[in-house]
Amino acid sequence: MEALLAFAAALLALRFAGELLGRARERHSQALLAWSASLFAYALASGALAWGAAAGWSDAAFRVYYLAGGLLTAPLLGTGSLLLAGKRWAGPLAVGYVGLAIGIALAMPLTAHFAGTAIPAAQDHLDFFPARLVAILANSLGTLAVVVVAVRSFRRRPLGNALILLGTGIAAAGSAVAGLGVAATSLFVALAALVLYAGFLAASGVPIPRLRVRAAPG
């Protein structure tokens, strides 16, 4: 059941990432492109959760989970906010950082073996330097960028900024409650992806699609 919930959250985040990518191509928006990448990383992290819950955690599953969820999601989210604010230097910087993050995830030594399906704690399997230090700095700076841009432009984009701040808070809360298990974390992933998706669209001036429910025949 936990694996199914994590997989469903991954599919939801992936769907939203694809929708944003299409919007980014239509509007030639670098901000939407970066936000699409952040949701894709979020989907990949949730997919790794499903992998670990279904087959047990392994070195490969943990590296994917840490790369996508620990190293990429928040920095790419911050990159999108900076690009929306007109900081064009954020794009090339993000590309360089993604390369660095991939290198760290591939090369980082793991200090303990994995057992079971519970979400592994990073401090139990990674040295502080470089992987955990880089994750702390990148997540802090990414979140700071989101908050600063949202606060400074709140009057111009109140709905979008409010949703982005809320979605960022939900995502952070999901990371904080990882010890409660895959099911709880997956619910936070799904909710954060939904709120962030709506916030990204609203902040970019794109109408938020309405959910349509078809009545059953007969």
Image: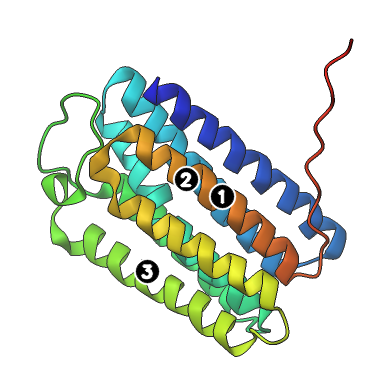
Disc 2: CA contacts within 10 A as few (<14), some (14-19) or many (>=20)? many
Mark 1 or 3, which is nearer the eye?
1
Amino acid type, callout 1: Ala
Question: Counting residues from the N terminus, which is met first, the one under dot 3 or under dot 2?
Answer: 3
Q: Position of residue 187 (x, y in %)?
A: 45, 40
Residue named by callout 2? 189
Amino acid type, callout 2: Val
Q: Which mark is residue 138?
A: 3
Mark 3 or 2, which is nearer the eye?
2
Q: Kindly report the distance in space between the C-alpha atoms of the residues bearing marks 1 and 3.
A: 20 Å
Residue at 46 percent across and 66 percent down: it is 75
- Is residue 164 among the parts visible in the rendering? yes
- The quadrant of the image that shows the N terminus is top left
Residue at 44 percent across and 56 percent down: it is 171
Q: Position of residue 24 (x, y in %)?
A: 77, 59
Side (left or right) of 130 relative to 141: left
Residue 29 in the image: above or below residue 56: below
Side (left or right) of 53 relative to 93: left
Q: Position of residue 204 (x, y in %)?
A: 75, 70
Amino acid type, callout 3: Ala
Q: Observer-nearest residue: 108 or 81? A: 81
Residue named by callout 1? 193
Question: Counting residues from the N terminus, which is met first, the one under dot 1 or under dot 3?
Answer: 3
Q: Which mark is residue 83?
A: none
Residue at 37 percent across and 67 percent down: it is 139
Q: Residue 125 lies in what quarter of the image?
A: top left
SS at badge 1: helix
SS at badge 3: helix
